Image: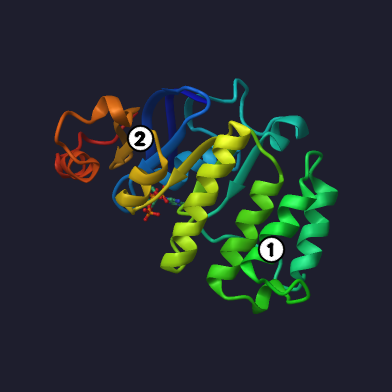
Amino acid sequence: MLRANGLGKRYRQRWALADCTLAIPAGKVVGLVGPNGAGKTTLLQLAAGLLRPTSGTLEVLGRPPAVTPAQLARVGFVAQSTPTYASLSVADHLRLGAWLNPRWDGRLAEARIERLGLDRQRRAGRLSGGQRAQLALTLAIAKRPELLILDEPVASLDPLARSEFLQELSAVVAEHSLSVLLSSHLIADVERVCDYLVVLVESRLRVAGAIDELLTAGRSLEDLVLTHMAQPAREARP
Ligand SMILES: Nc1ncnc2c1ncn2[C@@H]1O[C@H](COP(=O)(O)OP(=O)(O)OP(=O)(O)O)[C@@H](O)[C@H]1O
C-alpha cells in the first residue's frame, strides 16, 4: 500500500515529518494515531500527492503519488476539512463525481445519499459540518479507489453516524478489498476497524505493525498507544 524511505517534509526550519521509513502491505486498514502536531496530516497529504517530500522517497500502490490521472483515480482522499463546493447542490456533487471519475459508482453514491437523508437539491454550503463530511466521504467511496485516505473522517459525525460510517467502511473494505489509511484520535474506533497501526510522535515514526502482532496478551490498544505517546521523542531531524 505504502512504502516510505527516509521520508521527510520540512516547513522552514521545522520538520513536520522526519526520517520516516515504513512499508505497509496492501489490503490493510491502517489507523494513524499520534498527538496533535505529530505529522499525521502531513503524511496523509504526502501519500495523496498534495505535498512533495523535502527528503526521501514515497510510493503509494507501487508508484509515486498522484503523478498521472490513472494514479489519481486509484486513490481517494478526504481532507480533515471535508471540502465541498458551497454553491453546488448535493446532486451537482454527484454529477461532478460521475464526470471526473472513470470508475464512478453512481448507484452506491445515490443509495448512500438516500440512506443519509440528504436533500439532493440542498447546496453544500447549507449543510451541517457532519452532513458535509458525509457528502465528501460519499464522493470518495463512490470513486471506487484502491486506497482510501481519510484524515480524521469521523471527527464531525454524531455517535450514531460515526458508528454507521465505521460499519459501512468495514463492509466496503470486505466487499472490494480496499486499502484504507485513516487518522484518528479515537483509539476505540481504530481498534474497531483497523488491523494495522502507525504511531507518529513529534514528527517521527514511533511504531508500525499489524495490531494483532503488536498487542501482547492482556494489553489494550489504548494502553499500547498511550505508552508510545508518553515516551520522550528524539529530536526531530532527518
Ligand atoms: N503549512 C504549514 N506550514 C508550517 N508548518 C506546518 C504546516 N502544516 C503543518 N505544519 C506543522 O507541521 C507539524 C505537523 O502538522 P500536522 O498537521 O501534520 O500534524 P497532525 O498530527 O495532523 O496534527 P492534528 O492531530 O492536530 O491534526 C505541526 O508542528 C504543524 O504546526
- Which x, y percent locates residue 26? 52, 24
Mark 2, residue position:
198
Label 1's element?
helix
Quadrant in the rendering for residue 109: bottom right
**Left or right: where 92 falls relative to 75:** right
Where 210 sits versus 174, above or below?
A: above
- All told, the count of numbered labels is 2
Report how far apart the C-alphas of labels 1 and 2 lie in the structure: 32 Å
Residue 4 is labelled as none
Of the pair 148 and 37, the residue shown nearer to us = 148
Mark 1, residue position:
113
Label 2's element?
strand
- Please report whichever mark, 1 or 2, sits nearer to the chain's N-terminal start: 1
Q: Residues within 10 Å of mark 2 (few under 14, many from 20)?
A: many
- Which x, y percent locates residue 159? 41, 66
* Amino acid type shown at disc 2: Val
Residue at left 33%, top 54%? 186
Front of the two marks 1 and 2: 1
**Left or right: where 126 falls relative to 180:** right
* Amino acid type shown at disc 1: Ile
Residue at left 47%, top 51%? 166
Of the pair 50 and 194, the residue shown nearer to us = 194
- Which x, y percent locates residue 197? 35, 35
Quadrant holding the C terminus = top left
Where 107 sits versus 196, above or below?
A: below
